[in-house]
Each structure stands twice: as C-alpha cells, then as structure tokens.
Image (tube, rainbow, N blue to C red):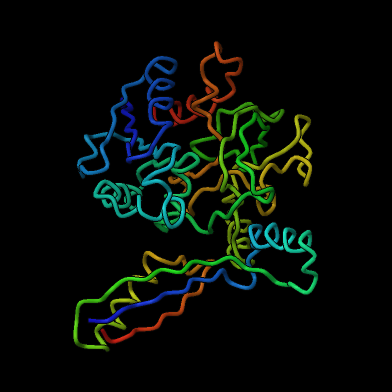
Amino acid sequence: MFKAKVIIKRRPSILDPQGIAVEKGAFHLGLTNIKETRIGKFIEFTVDTKDKMAAEKEVTEYCNKLLANPIMEDFEFTLENL
Amino acid sequence: MKPKFGVVVFPGSNCDHDAYYALRKIMNVDVTFLWHKENDLQDTNVIILPGGFSYGDYLRCGAIARFSPIMNSVVDFANKGGIVIGICNGFQVLLEAGLLPGVMIKNKSLKFVCKDIYLTVENKKTVFTSDINFEKPFKVPIAHGEGNYFADDETLKELLDNDQIVFKYSSQDGRIDDESNPNGSTMNIAGIINRNGNVLGMMPHPERACDPVLGKSDGKMFFESILKNLN
C-alpha cells in the first residue's frame, strides 16, 4: 500500500485571479516581499497495491483524467510506502 | 422531424426546470428530463446540459459530471452529429468532456456575477443563430463565478479560422471591449461551437429570457432558430 500526495498547480501561462487577490492581502499586511502567489490544490489518498510501478501508473491516470485538467494545470506526486 | 428536447439532470443542476419550462410552456415543444444515472436518451434530438453546480462543482466545474453514465450517451450522440447545447455549467461540462476546446477559470473579479448582459452574434450561419435578429445585440442574463473562458493561442487561432466563436459579450450598442466583458473571458467569448457545428457551449442563459413576464424575451430567438433548422 502507498500513500500518494498530489500537488496540482496552475500552469505559469494561466492567470490566477485568486493568487493575485490573496497577494493584495499580503501587501495590506505589510508583507511587501511576497511575490508571485499561486493557488493550487493538495490531494492525498492511498493506493492499494504492492507494485510501485502499477501505483505510479494508476496515480498518473487519475491525475491526467480527473484530478487535473492538463489544459491549465500541471501535477506532481510522491508515493510513500505504508 | 418533430423535435424532442432532453434536459439532463445532474445532482446540483438548478436550471433544468428553467430550460424545461421555457421549452414546454413558451416554445410549446416536447421535452423530457434525462437523469444522470441513465444512459437512454429517450429518442430526443436536442440535448441540453443545463446550468447549476453539478456534483457541487467539486475539483473543477463540470469535472465529475462528465463521468456520469448519461454523458457517455451524450458524447456518442454529439459525435454522430446530434445537437447538444451546454448552458453555463453545461458549457463547463462540455469543456471538461472534451467536446469543446478550452477551459473556464474564475471570473477576473473573483465575484459571482448575476446580471443581464448583451451578446453579439459572431457566427450567423449556425443552427443556433440563423434566426436571431442580429441587427442589434440581444439581452440575456448570466449567473456564474467561473465563466472566464481561456484557451491557448493555437486553440484561439483554430476557433477563429473555423468560425467557431458564436457569441461575444458586448455593450447594448455592440461595442466589444473590456468594459462590456463581465468575467475577463479571452476576446469577450461567451459561446463557441465545435468544428462540426452541432455542439454549442454558452455561459449566458437564453432559457431565462423566454417568458415576457420576466421582462425579457430575446432568448426565444435562440430556441426559434434551432426549431426552424430542425424542421
């Protein structure tokens, strides 16, 4: 069994209005060094197999077809042996 | 061909009854609901994916709805040339299902925008628009938080080259600019069709602008156009 941790980020070329709005909050807090805020998603779940290759394949398909929209998002993940 | 409309009902759809009402009571056509767990399209010849918040819009708007059993049948129907219209959340489902190109991101203002807007018809030769009086922009409401259409340059070029942009947001007198863009959509895009011209996605709600009691009825032209082209 593996623990999968997925991070989904908006592609750099895509406008992130949420990130821009949040960063305005940072500015109002006086945190003037904060730049390039981007909001993404963190998703975790388990993969019930002993085969790491199979787990990687399944998680990649999950990300490509459902968790992320490849038109606007990139994803990365880690697998931890439980 | 006697038209029969099908309105898909996902958990969280909330414009399904608006579409049903406009078609049955105002347009006087045959219409039936299609439950998301079914796969039978019940001999309908126009499918509407209505507005709302399918599956709570979890993950991304429309992302989960596209895996509904009914969507397999809708995709087959569309690929065989059947007429499919996605309104608002329905447009988002069509994008996620890959029936139309591009994605929706949050409105530039980050606000849910609910108001009447004006649309210009950019492609007058579609089954959806040929009967719309395009001398002046027509008035329909929008109500969405993620209607900011985005596509990469290559996709936009394809949309332009193939005349796939059907509606654009404009001012009442037809100006297409940032001021008349309610959500930040690229090129003020409000509605597009697929290359074959049988699948339309649009963020505005023509079904909410059919009954004159509601103070506006420009949306009727849209449905009249479809009905005229089906006959």
Residue at far front of view = A29
The residue sitting at 57% across, 19% down in the picture is: B217
Instruction: From this view, report whether residue A43 is shown above or below residue B167.
Output: below
Instruction: From this view, report whether residue B87 is shown above or below residue B99.
Output: above
Q: Is residue B39 left or right of residue B66?
A: left
Which of the two residues, B109 or B212, is positioned nearer the viewer here?
Answer: B109
Q: Is residue B183 left or right of residue A75?
A: right
Q: Which of the 4 image quadrants contains residue A3? A: bottom left
Q: Which of the 4 image quadrants contains residue A20? A: bottom right
Residue at far top of view = B213
Q: Which of the 4 image quadrants contains residue B118? A: top right
Image quadrant where one finds the C terminus of chain B:
top left
Q: Position of residue B2 (x, y in %)?
A: 31, 25
Q: Position of residue B21 (x, y in %)?
A: 40, 20
| Numbered disc total | 0
Q: Is residue B219 left or right of residue A50?
A: right
Image quadrant where one finds the N terminus of chain B:
top left
Which of the two residues, A66 or A2, is positioned nearer the viewer here?
Answer: A2
The residue sitting at 47% across, 74% down in the picture is: A7
Instruction: From this view, report whether residue B97 is shown above or below residue B29.
Output: below
Instruction: From this view, report whether residue A38 is shown above or below residue B185.
Output: below
The residue sitting at 49% across, 71% down in the picture is: A8
Which of the two residues, B141 or A39, is positioned nearer the viewer here?
Answer: A39
Q: Position of residue B197 (x, y in %)?
A: 47, 47
Q: Is residue B126 left or right of residue B67?
A: right
Q: Position of residue B195 (x, y in %)?
A: 49, 54
